Amino acid sequence: MEAPVQLVLPLLDSEDLARVSFSDVWGGFDEAILAASERYGADAVLVGRAGRSVDGRLLVRWILHFRDQREEWRSTLEDGIQHTADRFAEIFAPAGDRTLRALRVDVSGIDGLRAYGTVSQFLESLTLVQSVGVEEVADDRIVFRVALRGEQATLDRAISLGHILEPVNTTDSDGNRGSGADLSYRFRP
């Protein structure tokens, strides 16, 4: 099962219209757009400003805000959306590295079978994860053994998009991980 990418369009209700005006969008005042977008809980914001060229073609000036990065380009409507999809594929999908590596992923806050099922199913749904198994169970903590195609950092970025696991710093003052896990999270039901 693939983890879906959810596309959310603004409601353009009275709250949106009170926070963002046409001149904000057309003038490229991104701060107002980003502030208004916070209500949707989006991980990225894509803004398109469309106009007609002299020969009648629809051209769009795109701006993609993702984390602390801003990328701008001009293209057609279809090419802009495809460019965005390609950009996220570069970030979250393993490209050339097909080597399997095993990682230990420590998840605390698992207080029952339903929480275990949610976390396990989420990890299995990630494209770069080949398999998930349980290595250790202690109290409300499970250490999963994850077979991964790609890099640990790519898995961490993919997990952050799910909004069900929050990172936990388990390193001591010497930089050693207390649980011996490669990544540590807390389940957010």
Image (cartoon, rainbow, N blue to C red):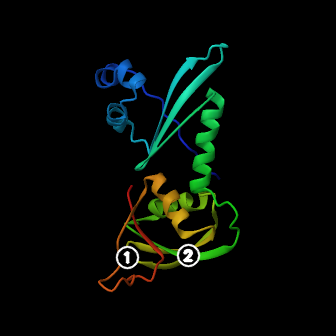
Q: Residue furthest front?
A: 54
Q: Give, as a three-letter code, the residue at label 2.
A: Leu
Q: Give, as a three-letter code, the residue at label 1.
A: Asp
> Vertical placement of 34 versus 96: above or below?
above
Q: What residue appears at the point 40 percent right and 50 percent down from the top-left corner?
A: 68
Q: Quadrant of the C terminus?
A: bottom left
Crowd tier of the residue under label 2, counting other residues whose Cα lies within 10 Å: few below 14, some 14–19, many 20 or above: some
Counting from the top left corner in percent of width and height, residue 142 is at 46, 73
Crowd tier of the residue under label 1, counting other residues whose Cα lies within 10 Å: few below 14, some 14–19, many 20 or above: few
Q: Secondary structure at mark 2?
A: strand
Say which of marks 1 and 2 sits in front: 2
> Vertical placement of 102 versus 188: above or below?
below
- Using the rendered view, name the quadrant where residue 186 is placed: bottom left
Q: Secondary structure at mark 1?
A: loop
Q: CA distance from mark 1 to mark 2?
A: 21 Å
Q: Nearer the viewer, residue 44 or 143?
A: 44
Residue 118 visible from this viewpoint: no
Left or right: 118 in relation to 79: left
Q: Which mark is residue 103?
A: 2
Residue 184 visible from this viewpoint: yes
Residues at marks 1 and 2 touching, judged by CB atoms closer than 8 Å: no
Counting from the top left corner in percent of width and height, residue 77 is at 62, 27
Q: Nearer the viewer, residue 78 or 165?
A: 78
Q: Where is mark 1, residue-wise? A: 139
Q: What residue appears at the point 52 percent right and 32 percent down from the top-left corner?
A: 62
Q: Nearer the viewer, residue 4 or 36?
A: 36
> Vertical placement of 4 versus 40: above or below?
below
Counting from the top left corner in percent of width and height, residue 183 is at 46, 72
Query: Which numbered disc, 1 or 2, marks the residue that appears first in the sequence?
Result: 2
